[in-house]
Image: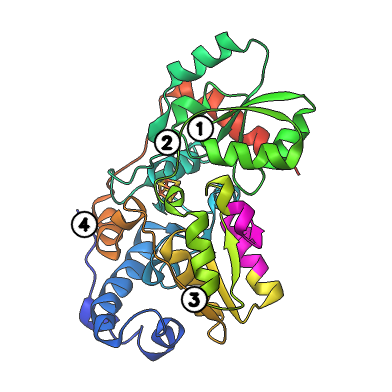
């Protein structure tokens, strides 16, 4: 039976303090609706002994108001191993929930919407990896975490945008197969000197940015500092002042405090970083990830009420997939 939550009582818990933190990103008129959901979720987390892991691309009412642990794919993978709870709710997309399950096989992992996929994860199948291995015998397969557990199971080691270079260099080889993001592979190849055999997958959010758009931004917003995610096309990276993972972009803002800055990545990332630095001007060309935006406060609450949708992985795939993720996590 679903736990009962007293919304009337809990409305008093989240008033001015929490709203003060997010008021630059959430209109006051929307807040009462969010506040009720937030209070219900906080009560359910206690009842279920649950934690919520939220990716940087989640909206501020999730990222700043109900998440226990936040970060990019690498941070979430690492944090997932430290979780002391019976239930993990993954506020992100399906491959992230699978990674959390791989690293926490004894915990219940829930994703609030099963349709929260990823264009990169959908671009490649396990049989594609097997064919590549046949075409390039002996060449190690490095797989971006934005893939299914079945594809990870075919791989030697995983990587994220934050550690791709370190992972490739850790192998000590002259040539690797890097899947499935073509642009990340090309951008990493330019950095490492290692020959990279790439796949043709693209992130449907980052591939929309163009070099012409960067030049226009510089004309329209003089002095703007341009930070770009390495899933963007190489010509965008060439125009940017800095390229790095979502965690690296956030760190860049924290250390350099650029007066005017643009983050070429998913929209909510800027919203979430801007909340921390209200004194900085964030220029916001907005490319939304429709998969990330399937996660809402409402379906997080329902996931905790009903314990759906539980993420499970075939044990025959889980062991090799976990090995590829753990091998990545061992790279410093
Ligand atoms: S932003 Fe791109 S890589 Fe991330 S989940 Fe969405 S489609 Fe996948």
Q: In the rendered view, tell whether residue 21 sits above or below residue 73.
A: below
What residue is disc 1 on?
180
Which x, y percent locates residue 155? 57, 24
Nearer to us: label 4 or label 1: 1
**Disc 4 or 3, which lies upstream in sequence?**
4
Task: Give the dominant element type of the magenta stretch: helix, strand or loop.
Answer: helix
Q: Distance between the residues labelled 1 and 3?
A: 34 Å
Residues at discs 1 and 3 in contact (Cβ within 8 Å): no
Q: Mark 3: give few (<14), some (14-19) or many (20+) Cα within 10 Å.
A: few
Task: Bin the neighbour count of mark 2 within 10 Å (Cα to Cα): few under 14, some 14-19, many 20 and up.
Answer: many
Q: Residues within 10 Å of mark 1 (few under 14, many from 20)?
A: many
Are discs 2 and 1 less than 8 Å apart at CB?
yes
Could you say which quadrant of the image residue 4 lies in?
bottom left
Respond yes or no on whether mark 3 lies under 8 Å from ligand 1: no
Label 1: state its secondary structure: loop
Mark 2: which secondary structure? helix
Q: In this view, does 173 lie above or below 297?
A: above
Q: Which numbered disc covers residue 2?
A: 4
The residues bearing labels 3 and 2 have C-alpha atoms spaced at a distance of: 35 Å
Q: Which of marks 2 and 1 is nearer the N terminus?
A: 2
Q: List the single residue furthest toward the bottom.
A: 16
> Which residue is tagged 2?
121
Mark 4 to mark 2 CA distance (whole Å): 33 Å
């Amino acid at each position: 039976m679903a736990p009962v939550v007293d919304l009337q009582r809990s409305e008093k818990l989240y008033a001015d303090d929490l709203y003060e933190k997010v008021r630059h990103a959430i209109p006051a008129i929307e807040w009462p609706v969010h506040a009720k959901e937030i209070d219900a979720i906080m009560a359910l987390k206690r009842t279920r002994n649950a934690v919520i892991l939220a990716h940087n691309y989640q909206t501020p009412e999730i990222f700043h108001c109900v998440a226990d642990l936040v970060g990019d794919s690498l941070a979430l993978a690492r944090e997932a191993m430290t979780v002391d709870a019976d239930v993990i709710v993954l506020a992100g997309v399906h491959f992230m929930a699978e990674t959390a399950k791989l690293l926490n096989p004894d915990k219940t992992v829930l994703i609030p919407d099963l349709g929260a996929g990823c264009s990169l994860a959908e671009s490649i199948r396990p049989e594609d990896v097997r064919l590549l291995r046949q075409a390039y015998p002996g060449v190690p397969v490095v797989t971006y975490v934005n893939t299914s557990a079945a594809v990870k199971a075919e791989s030697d080691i995983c990587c994220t945008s934050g550690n791709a270079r370190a992972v490739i260099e850790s192998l000590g080889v002259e040539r690797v197969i890097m899947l499935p993001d073509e642009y990340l592979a090309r951008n990493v190849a330019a950095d490492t000197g290692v020959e990279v055999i790439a796949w043709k997958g693209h992130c449907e959010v980052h591939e929309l940015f163009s070099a012409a758009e960067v030049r226009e931004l510089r004309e329209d917003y003089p002095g703007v500092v341009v930070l770009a995610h390495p899933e963007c096309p190489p010509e965008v990276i060439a125009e940017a002042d800095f390229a790095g993972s979502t965690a690296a972009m956030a760190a860049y803002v924290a250390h350099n405090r650029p007066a005017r800055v643009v983050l070429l990545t998913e929209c909510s990332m800027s919203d979430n970083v801007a909340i921390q630095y209200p004194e900085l001007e964030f220029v916001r060309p907005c490319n939304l990830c429709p998969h990330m935006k399937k996660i809402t406060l409402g379906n997080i609450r329902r996931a905790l009420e009903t314990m759906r949708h539980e993420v499970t992985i075939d044990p025959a795939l889980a062991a090799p997939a976990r090995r590829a993720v753990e091998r990545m996590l061992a790279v410093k």
